[in-house]
Image (cartoon, rainbow, N blue to C red):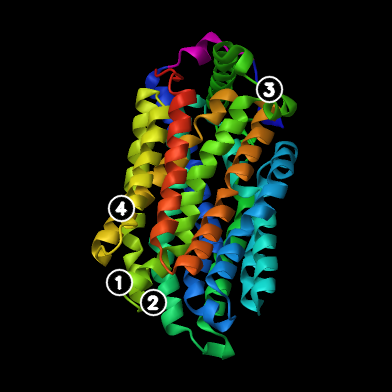
C-alpha cells in the first residue's frame, strides 16, 4: 500500500510548529473519525441486536437459553477464521474498496436473520455474519495506523470505539420501539422487522465508504502537500522510534508476530475483557427484563443508562492514557473495575436498581479496557506484523465473544440463576487485568 512507502523524515517534519501539528491532526480527525464512528455504530447494532430480538425470537423458534447463547456467540467463530486474511487483503487492496463492500454484504446477511426458523438456521446465519464482518474492526484499527503515530492512537481508538456504547444508547430504544410497535406488521414478527430495518444503514454506509475514504495520506486530495509530508514524516519517525525502543521484542513480519510471546499474551488479555463485554451485550436486555420491567420499550430506555455512562468514561480514560503515555495501568484498572461491577451485580437478592448500577460500572470498565487495550499491540507491531498480528489478536481475543454468551446460557440453564454466570465473567476480566500488569506495566510511550 502507499501508506507503507513513506519519505525520509525532514527536520521540518520532526520539529513542526505545535499549532500546525494540532491543526493537521484536527483536520484528519474531523475527516475520518466521525464517519468511521458511524460505520461502527451500524456494525455493532447489527452484531448485538440479537440481544433484543431474543426477547421474542427465542419463544417463536423454541430455543433454549443454551441454544441462544451458543448461536449468538458463534458469530465469533466466523470472525476467527477470516480476520487475518481480511486484514492482509486490506493492506494490499486499500480501505475504501475493502471496507465498503464488507459493510454492504454484512447488512444483507444481518437482514437475512429474519429468515431463521430454528436453532440450526440461527447458527448458520450468525456464523455467516461473523465471516463477512470479520474484516471491519481490525481493518479500521490497522487503517488508523496509516494516519496516526503511537502517541495519538489511544485517543483515536477510544473516539472510534465510543460507537460501542453509543450503539447501545441509540440502538436500545430503537430496538425496544420496534419490538413494541412492529408485531404482525406486513405479516412479519417484530423481531424480524428489527433485523431488516437495522441492517439498512450498513448498506448505505458501505456505498458511501467507497466514495468518502482515502487509503492513506498519500492519496488524500483534501490534504495540502505540506500537511501530507508532515503526516508521513511523523509516521516514519514513529516507526523508527518504536524499532529502536523495542529492539528484539519488536516484530515486523507476520511470521515473527506469530512467534512472539507478547502477541499471544495480548490474545489472552483481550479474551477476558471480550468475554465480559459480549456476555453483557447479548444478555443485558434479558437481565433487565428479569429484574426491572417486561415492557420492551422501557427495557430499551434502561439500557441507555450503562451505555451513556460508558460513552463518557471511555473517552476520559483514553485521553488520560494519551496525556500520560501510560497504557498498561489504564487497561488493567479498567478491566478490574469491570470485573468488580460484574461481581456486584451477581450478589443474590439485590434490587433491580442496584443491579443496573453495578452493570453500569461493569460496562464502563470493560469497554474502557477494550478501547485502551489497542494502544498496546501497536507499540509492538509494525508492517506485515501489524496487519496480521492485529487481526490475530482480535480474532483469538474475540473468541471470548463465543465463550461468554455460551457460558451464561449454559450456567443459567443448569442453575436457573445469573449469579454464577456473572461471577464467571468477572473472573475473566480480573485475569486480563493481572496479565496486563504483570507483563506490560513497565512499558511507556513518550509524551511530547
Above or below, 230 relative to 112: above
Of the two numbered discs 3 and 2 on the same chain, state the one appearing first in sequence: 3
Residue at x 54%, y 13% (from the top left corner):
245
Side of 320 relative to 249 (left or right): left
Task: For marks 1 and 3, give the CA distance.
Answer: 51 Å
Q: Nearer the viewer, mark 1 or mark 2?
A: 1
The mark found on residue 344 in the picture is: 4
Quarter of the rendering occupied by the C terminus: top left
Residue 296 disc label? 2
- Tell whether position 185 is magenta: no
In the picture of the structure, the residue carrying the numbered disc 1 is 292
Q: Which of marks 1 and 3 is in front?
A: 1
* Residue 97 visible, this angle: no
- Dot 1: what SS? loop
Is residue 216 or residue 107 the one in the foreground?
Answer: 107
| Contact? badges 1 and 3 (CB < 8 Å) | no
Dot placed on the residue nearer the N-terminal end, 1 or 3: 3
**CB within 8 Å, label 1 to label 2:** no
Position of 89 relative to 64 (above/below): above
Amino acid at each position: 500500500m502507499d501508506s507503507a512507502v513513506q519519505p525520509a523524515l525532514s527536520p521540518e517534519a520532526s520539529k513542526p510548529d505545535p499549532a500546525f501539528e494540532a491543526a493537521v491532526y484536527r483536520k484528519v480527525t474531523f475527516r475520518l473519525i466521525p464517519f468511521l464512528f458511524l460505520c461502527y455504530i451500524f456494525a455493532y447494532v447489527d452484531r448485538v441486536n440479537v440481544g433484543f430480538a431474543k426477547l421474542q425470537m427465542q419463544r417463536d423458534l423454541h430455543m433454549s437459553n443454551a441454544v441462544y447463547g451458543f448461536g449468538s456467540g458463534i458469530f465469533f467463530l466466523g470472525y476467527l477464521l477470516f480476520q487475518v486474511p481480511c486484514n492482509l487483503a486490506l493492506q494490499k487492496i486499500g480501505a475504501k474498496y475493502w471496507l465498503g463492500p464488507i459493510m454492504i454484504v454484512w447488512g444483507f446477511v444481518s437482514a437475512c436473520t429474519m429468515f431463521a426458523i430454528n436453532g440450526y438456521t440461527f447458527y448458520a446465519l450468525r456464523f455467516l455474519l461473523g465471516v463477512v464482518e470479520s474484516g471491519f474492526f481490525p481493518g479500521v484499527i490497522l487503517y488508523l495506523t496509516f494516519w496516526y503515530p503511537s502517541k495519538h492512537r489511544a485517543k483515536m481508538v477510544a473516539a472510534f470505539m465510543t460507537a460501542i456504547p453509543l450503539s447501545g444508547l441509540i440502538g436500545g430504544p430503537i430496538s425496544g420501539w420496534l419490538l413494541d410497535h412492529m408485531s404482525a406488521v406486513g405479516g412479519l414478527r417484530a423481531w424480524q422487522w428489527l433485523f431488516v430495518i437495522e441492517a439498512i444503514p450498513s448498506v448505505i454506509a458501505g456505498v458511501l465508504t467507497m466514495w468518502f475514504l482515502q487509503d492513506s495520506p498519500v492519496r488524500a486530495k483534501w490534504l495540502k502537500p505540506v500537511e501530507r509530508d508532515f503526516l508521513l514524516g511523523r509516521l516514519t519517525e514513529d516507526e523508527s522510534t518504536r524499532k529502536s525502543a523495542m529492539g528484539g521484542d519488536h516484530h515486523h513480519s507476520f511470521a515473527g508476530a506469530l512467534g512472539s510471546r507478547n502477541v499471544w499474551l495480548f490474545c489472552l488479555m483481550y479474551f477476558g475483557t471480550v468475554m465480559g463485554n459480549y456476555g453483557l451485550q447479548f444478555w443485558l436486555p434479558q437481565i433487565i427484563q428479569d429484574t426491572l420491567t417486561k415492557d420492551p420499550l422501557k427495557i430499551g430506555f434502561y439500557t441507555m443508562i450503562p451505555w451513556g455512562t460508558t460513552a463518557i468514561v471511555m473517552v476520559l480514560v483514553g485521553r488520560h492514557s494519551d496525556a500520560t503515555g501510560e497504557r498498561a495501568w489504564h487497561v488493567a484498572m479498567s478491566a478490574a473495575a469491570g470485573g468488580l461491577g460484574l461481581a456486584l451485580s451477581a450478589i443474590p437478592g439485590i434490587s433491580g436498581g442496584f443491579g443496573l448500577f453495578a452493570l453500569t460500572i461493569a460496562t464502563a470498565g470493560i469497554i474502557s479496557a477494550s478501547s485502551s487495550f489497542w494502544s498496546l499491540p501497536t507499540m509492538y507491531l509494525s508492517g506485515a506484523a501489524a496487519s496480521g498480528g492485529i487481526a490475530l489478536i482480535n480474532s483469538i481475543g474475540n473468541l471470548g465473544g463465543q465463550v461468554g454468551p455460551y457460558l451464561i446460557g449454559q450456567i443459567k440453564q443448569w442453575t436457573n440463576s445469573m449469579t454464577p454466570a456473572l461471577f464467571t465473567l468477572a473472573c475473566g476480566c480480573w485475569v486480563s487485568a493481572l496479565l496486563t500488569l504483570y507483563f506490560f506495566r513497565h512499558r511507556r510511550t513518550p509524551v511530547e
